[in-house]
Image (spheres, rainbow, N blue to C red):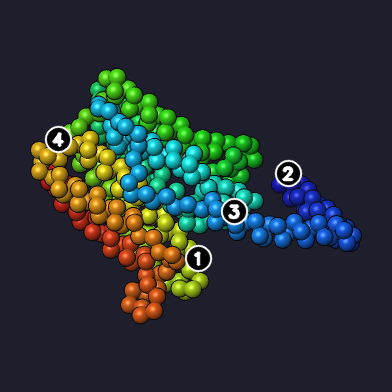
C-alpha cells in the first residue's frame, strides 16, 4: 500500500513537471507564469509586514468586570479573543499563506497561550480557586485542557491523518468560552472562586516553574553556540519567552486585584506590585533585530542574556513572595 502510494505520488509530480514544461514552451503562457511569480515575490513580503503584529500592549484589560467575577479569568479570556479576532492567529498558517513565513508573531502567540495554559491550570489545581468537594470545576478544567492544544495545528494535521481535524483557533475559542462560562457561574454563585492564600501560592509556584522553563530555553539555545549571523532560530526563542512573560504580566496584574485582601493581610501588596512591574519590564523588551552574540561581545548585543537577567529578577521576587504566602 505504501509503495503504491509512493508510486502514484511520483507519477503525479512527474505529470505536474511535464505540464509546467509544456506551458513554458508557449511565450504567452510563460509570461503568465512569470507574472504570477513576480506577484508572489512582491505581495508576500508586503502581506507579511501588514499582518505581523506582536501585541505587547502593557495596558491591555478586559471589559468592566464586576464582583464576584474574577478579573484574572476575564482578562485571560479577553487575551484569547484578541489574538483570534483582532490580531488573527497565524501560528498555524499553511505554507501557501504569508503568515506561515512569519517568525516573531507566531512565536509570541504560542508563548502567550502557553503562559495562559499554565495560569489556568494553577487556578484549577487541588490548591486552586475552584477545587471543591466534587473536585475541579468542569469549565475551568475544560479550558485548561484546550489551552494545551498545539497552536500549530491547522484544519488538517498531516502528521496524524489526512482527514480534517479541529484547528487551534477552534480549540482556543472553546477555551475562551469555557472561561467566560466559568466566570458567569461564579457570578451566579454556582461555581467557586476561593480567594485564599493557598490558591495564590499555587499561582506563584506555577509562575516560578514557567520562569525556570524560560531561562532553561535561553540556556539551551546559548549552549549550542550558533554563528551569530546564521542564528535564525533566536527570534523564536526570544519571542516565545516574551509571549509567556507578557501573558503572566497581564493576568497576574488582574489576579492581584482579585486577591487584594489576601495580599493586604499578608502585607505583600507592594511585593506583588513590584513582581508584576518586573514581569511587565521583562515582557517589554523588543529589539528591532534579535541577536545572540557572546555576552562579552563589544560589537553585538545578546538579547537572550538580557531577557534571562530580567526573568531571573522576577523569579527572585516571586520566590520571596511565595515564602511569605506560605
Of mark 4 and mark 1, the one earlier in the sequence is 1
Tell me which residue sits at (60%, 41%) in the image: 156
Spatial CA span between label 4 and label 1: 47 Å
Where residue 114 appears, as percent x and y from the top left, is 39, 46
Tell me which residue sits at (33%, 27%) in the image: 183
Spatial CA span between label 2 and label 1: 39 Å
Give the quarter of the figure containing the C terminus.
top left
| Nearer to me, 17 or 263 | 263
Q: Identify the residue under disc 4.
A: 261
Residue 302 lies, with reference to residue 17, above or below; the image says below
Spatial CA span between label 4 and label 2: 66 Å
Where residue 186 appears, as percent x and y from the top left, is 29, 24
Q: Hey, which quadrant is residue 260 in on the image? A: top left
Give the quarter of the figure containing the N terminus.
top right
Tell me which residue sits at (70%, 57%) in the image: 39
Answer left or right for 40 relative to 180.
Answer: right
Tell me which residue sits at (55%, 35%) in the image: 166
Where residue 110 appears, as percent x and y from the top left, is 44, 48
Between circles 4 and 1, the one closer to the viewer is 4
Of mark 4 and mark 2, the one earlier in the sequence is 2
Q: Identify the residue under disc 3.
A: 47
Spatial CA span between label 1 and label 3: 21 Å
Between circles 3 and 4, the one closer to the viewer is 3
Residue 232 image label: 1
Between circles 2 and 3, the one closer to the viewer is 3
Residue 57 lies, with reference to residue 123, above or below; the image says below
Q: Identify the residue under disc 2.
A: 1
- Label 3 sits on a secondary structure element that is helix
Spatial CA span between label 3 and label 4: 48 Å
Q: Residue furthest bottom?
A: 298
Answer left or right for 151 relative to 22.
Answer: left
Amino acid at each position: 500500500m505504501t509503495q503504491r502510494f509512493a508510486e502514484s505520488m511520483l507519477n503525479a509530480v512527474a505529470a505536474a513537471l511535464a505540464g509546467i514544461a509544456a506551458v513554458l514552451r508557449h511565450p504567452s503562457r510563460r509570461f503568465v507564469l512569470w507574472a504570477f511569480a513576480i506577484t508572489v515575490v512582491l505581495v508576500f513580503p508586503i502581506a507579511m509586514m501588514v499582518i505581523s503584529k506582536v501585541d505587547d500592549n502593557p495596558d491591555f484589560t478586559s471589559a468592566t468586570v464586576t464582583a464576584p467575577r474574577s478579573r484574572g479569568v476575564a482578562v485571560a479570556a479577553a487575551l484569547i479573543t484578541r489574538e483570534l479576532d483582532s490580531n488573527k492567529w497565524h501560528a498555524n498558517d499553511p505554507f501557501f499563506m504569508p503568515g506561515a513565513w512569519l517568525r516573531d508573531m507566531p512565536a509570541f502567540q504560542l508563548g502567550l497561550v502557553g503562559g495562559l495554559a499554565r495560569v489556568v491550570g494553577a487556578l484549577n489545581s487541588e490548591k486552586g480557586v475552584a477545587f471543591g468537594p466534587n473536585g475541579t470545576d468542569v469549565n475551568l478544567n475544560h479550558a485548561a485542557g484546550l489551552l494545551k492544544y498545539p497552536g500549530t495545528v491547522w484544519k488538517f494535521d498531516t502528521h496524524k491523518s489526512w482527514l480534517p481535524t479541529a484547528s487551534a483557533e477552534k480549540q482556543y475559542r472553546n477555551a475562551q468560552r469555557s472561561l467566560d462560562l466559568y466566570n458567569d457561574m461564579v457570578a451566579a454563585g454556582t461555581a467557586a472562586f476561593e480567594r485564599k492564600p493557598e490558591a495564590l501560592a499555587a499561582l506563584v509556584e506555577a509562575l516560578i516553574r514557567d520562569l525556570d522553563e524560560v531561562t532553561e530555553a535561553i540556556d539551551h539555545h546559548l549552549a549550542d553556540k550558533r554563528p551569530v549571523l546564521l542564528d535564525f532560530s533566536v527570534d523564536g526563542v526570544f519571542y516565545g519567552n516574551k509571549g509567556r512573560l507578557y501573558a503572566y504580566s497581564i493576568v497576574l496584574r488582574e489576579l492581584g486585584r482579585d486577591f487584594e485582601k489576601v495580599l493586604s493581610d499578608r502585607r505583600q501588596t507592594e511585593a506583588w506590585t513590584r513582581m508584576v512591574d518586573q514581569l511587565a519590564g521583562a515582557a517589554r523588551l523588543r529589539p528591532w533585530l534579535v541577536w545572540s552574540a557572546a555576552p562579552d561581545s563589544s560589537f553585538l548585543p545578546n538579547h537572550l542574556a538580557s531577557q534571562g537577567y530580567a526573568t531571573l529578577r522576577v523569579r527572585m521576587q516571586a520566590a520571596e513572595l511565595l515564602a511569605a504566602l506560605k
